[in-house]
Amino acid sequence: MQAPFADRLAQAVRQKRTPLVVGLDPRLEMLPPELAPDRPGHPAQVAAAYERFCCRVIELVAPLVPAVKPQVAFFEQWGPPGLEALARVIARARQSELLVLVDAKRGDIGSTAQAYAQAYLGPQAPWPGDALTVNPYLGPDTLDPFVAAAVEQGRGVFVLVKTSNRQSGVFQDLLAPENPVFEHVAAQVERLAGQTAASCGYGAVGAVVGATYPEQLARLRKLMPHAWLLVPGLGAQGATAADVAGAFDPGGLGAVVNSSRGIIFAWHREAYAPLGAARWEEAVQQAARDTIEQLRRHTPAGAL
Amino acid sequence: MQAPFADRLAQAVRQKRTPLVVGLDPRLEMLPPELAPDRPGHPAQVAAAYERFCCRVIELVAPLVPAVKPQVAFFEQWGPPGLEALARVIARARQSELLVLVDAKRGDIGSTAQAYAQAYLGPQAPWPGDALTVNPYLGPDTLDPFVAAAVEQGRGVFVLVKTSNRQSGVFQDLLAPENPVFEHVAAQVERLAGQTAASCGYGAVGAVVGATYPEQLARLRKLMPHAWLLVPGLGAQGATAADVAGAFDPGGLGAVVNSSRGIIFAWHREAYAPLGAARWEEAVQQAARDTIEQLRRHTPAGAL
């Protein structure tokens, strides 16, 4: 039985001295030319290219960051070969002693949620995550099977609370009747996080809160003192290191910050374009180092 | 280019003279003994058993109902072999001229939602559904990629509005500030349904509304005049044919009603237990016929 997820995450963040998580979001049209598939419409070839690319990214960032966040959708798009590639990418990340936060945003009624929980958090999970993202819309009873499976295996769950997209407020920010919907979800997350708190003070249940909404992020940090926050939206989605400052506790823990395209496809960005596609690996490492440095300078994570 | 989903569903419901959809929710512990895998923990063997079972159920119900609803979670639980089995189950249902409503409840921010949409609704979808269930929590901008992909291919989307589980009200029923959250979601569904209305009057975007909440169901029918409703919760979840009466338009169209365990595992029910596991196929067909008859007697679907 491994240590609780919350403690393992705290240890990994302290060891690497950064809360940066690298999102593995492979996209066909952005792959390095040397790794692009010969037949771009062929699922098995695309899946193999995604696997090679993600495994290489893992090798590049493993010395630098505590965790990676594979986005299941990009693998699922290519069918069973894509999902076989995902399983091997997860295995490679674990070999490299990175924590794996599987971004699948699953959610269903209780008996069905159990099946999803087994797929990502169970003892024989085909895609074993250290944690899984889940969607709360169906209600607290649909979170329970995920939480139970996670706790049993020393794994974790990140519940979507306030997402990073432009129209996330249309339902999440509705005043119900005095507090926005996302704060009602946050209250359930905090309840579950408190019930599962580990030595570090945080629990097995965390929250996804977008970096693109800095005010809500700071407020949610206060409302969920036992919940690790998984903060997407840095970089390509427009948020800066300063925007995520409110996500951390005074010691620099309590949040991990994800950047996907801004790191794994760094050579497409103006700042790293001079390296060119041939030196994409240097661009990936440099972008990761630069992002880590920005997080140190602008957030309490600098205290790590 | 095939006809719009809404019209194809209307035609199928009229042709079979019933709104009953059979949910394909295979569960290891409930399989007929003759189809149970030799090694119950072996993913490829379980997947093969699920495939044989679901394909046989499809043969049994194809003459009786317009559509099946495979639940992705139960296949996903077993990893890539499970999802390969799902692809073959979907292919078999299409061969049998059943519509396929893929129950995956996917949802993610826009650029990622595109990838999920391609997996289930795109021209080369590995799991091609006539429609897909999606989760609205992230916001309307995250529904758009699903709707765009669906409309382009003559397919459809069912958005979770009010789900059938016990605690669905904890977030969905919050008053925001005067109407519950689920009515805000319903308003977006109606907008998208109206924009995509086909000859039958219904659009490419429908709503999932649980049979276990009859009052809300009747109200949501009125609030979304252009939306097909997909109504789960009949049978094992406790709702009766009378509970779903409010889901239909006066002509008996506008809703399809799902039953899963109550039909595919009918021989486990007291009413059909006398047939025994050896005659499970008769139990499946008899339970489907009995449910169709109840829906005829207690709902406007009797007018079909």
Image (cartoon, coloured by chain):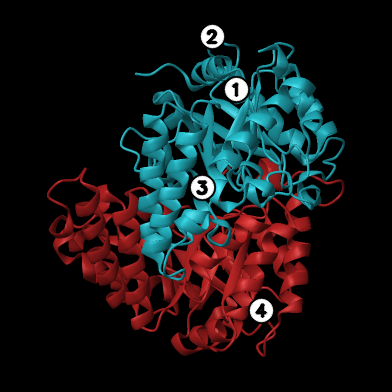
Chain colours: A cyan, B red
Closer to the N terminus: mark 1 or mark 3?
A: 3
Which residue position is annotated with label 4? B249
Which residue position is annotated with label 2? A199
Query: For the residues tagged 2 and 3, is the chain the same?
Result: yes
Q: Nearer the viewer, mark 2 or mark 1?
A: 2
Query: In the rendering, at what x and y percent does residue A28 appear?
Result: 53, 61
Quadrant where the C terminus of chain A is found in the figure: top right
Q: Secondary structure at mark 4?
A: loop
Query: For the residues tagged 1 and 3, is the chain the same?
Result: yes
Query: In the rendering, at what x and y percent does residue B170 appear?
Result: 67, 40
Q: Nearer the viewer, mark 2 or mark 3?
A: 2
Which residue position is annotated with label 3? A109
Q: Circles 2 and 1: CB distance less than 8 Å?
A: no
Q: Secondary structure at mark 2?
A: loop
Query: Where is B246 relative to A295, above or below?
Result: below
Q: Which amino acid type is marked by label 2?
A: Ser
